Amino acid sequence: MPEAATVRAVIGDSEFDRDTAVTLREPGVYDTDLSAGWTIISAVNGGYLLAVLGRALADALPHADPFTISAHYLTASQPGPAVVRTNVVRTGRTLSTGQASLFQYDDQGREAERIRVLASYGDLDSLPEDVRTTAEPPAFPPMDQCFGPEDGPAPVDGSSAIADRLMLKLDPSTLGWALGAPSGKGEMRAWFGLADGRDADPLSLLLAVDALPPTAFEIGLSGWVPTVELTVHVRCRPAPGPLRVSITTRNLAGGFLEEDAEVWDSADRLVAQSRQLARARLG
């Protein structure tokens, strides 16, 4: 008897789309509900949060695709209700620029700003096809020679809900930390997708750059590595199929490190780049 066809989620109708949805309350103001499904321990993933704000700006601005978006993470976000307030800074023929902030209430019932972003949006489909680059796709083992969370020990319940929503297959050469023997190189590479089969789009690229284990693990550190600032450049609309994400850290100093990420699609195109500054927990 033939196997039933696998049902894949599609862009616009997937868990990611539902969990990043925003509802217009009044011009420039959107209500949202941050899902606990995108947390690590109790922390809401920074890339998921950026996608929520990115979706609000896509609605508020006359252009739909993020070209560059920079976020400052001010206070820790919690699963639950939130409000996004947007402001149109400038609109032009090819680019429009806006600001957005996400707010929640703190334990004292006061409104607290969690994240503030500044972004420029455009139309990725209107870009010329001319590419002149020295960038090369990262060398990856085939997916069946890489390892995901399901290949390791069972996690503590609730410790990493986001892992259930991702398809991650990590390059074995960047997994020394999982075996108690970090390489010291500050590198992390993985095949990346959404667990329900939804293909990537510009908004999910904002998640992809921040979804791998921290490079700090391969430097020999452990524990949470909170993001201070994250800037993402979306270069083109990704082709269907799994992505390859490569992240490197070259400098840990003063308790802070940078992470530079590249995201490549199935057509060997560099579709997104990012840099973030993160705080490392030393000692």
Image (cartoon, rainbow, N blue to C red):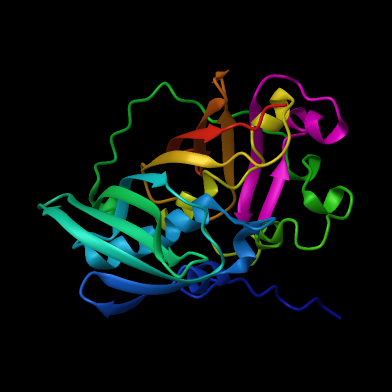
Instruction: Residue at 32%, 32% (x, y): give it.
Output: 131
x, y (%) of residue 70? 35, 43
* Along the line of sight, the residue nearer the viewer: 194 or 59: 59
Q: Check residue 182 for magenta coloring.
A: yes
Instruction: Residue at 61%, 39% (x, y): give it.
Output: 225
Q: Check residue 59 for magenta coloring.
A: no
* Farthest front residue in view: 108
Which range of residues does the magenta coloring cover? 167-193
Residue 91 visible to an observer of this rendering: yes
Instruction: Residue at 78%, 25% (x, y): give it.
Output: 182
Residue 179, quarter of picture: top right
Instruction: Residue at 43%, 48% (x, y): give it.
Output: 74
* Along the line of sight, the residue nearer the viewer: 97 or 246: 97
Query: How many numbered circles are shown?
Result: 0
Q: Is residue 279 left or right of residue 167?
A: left
x, y (%) of residue 56? 33, 65
Residue 140, quarter of picture: top right
Give the quadrant of the C terminus.
top right
x, y (%) of residue 204? 48, 56
* Farthest right residue in view: 153
Residue 270 visible to an observer of this rendering: no
Image height check: is 174 above or below 151? above
Q: Is residue 154 left or right of residue 70?
A: right
Q: Is residue 139 left or right of residue 115?
A: right
* Along the line of sight, the residue nearer the viewer: 10 or 266: 10
Give the quadrant of the N terminus.
bottom right
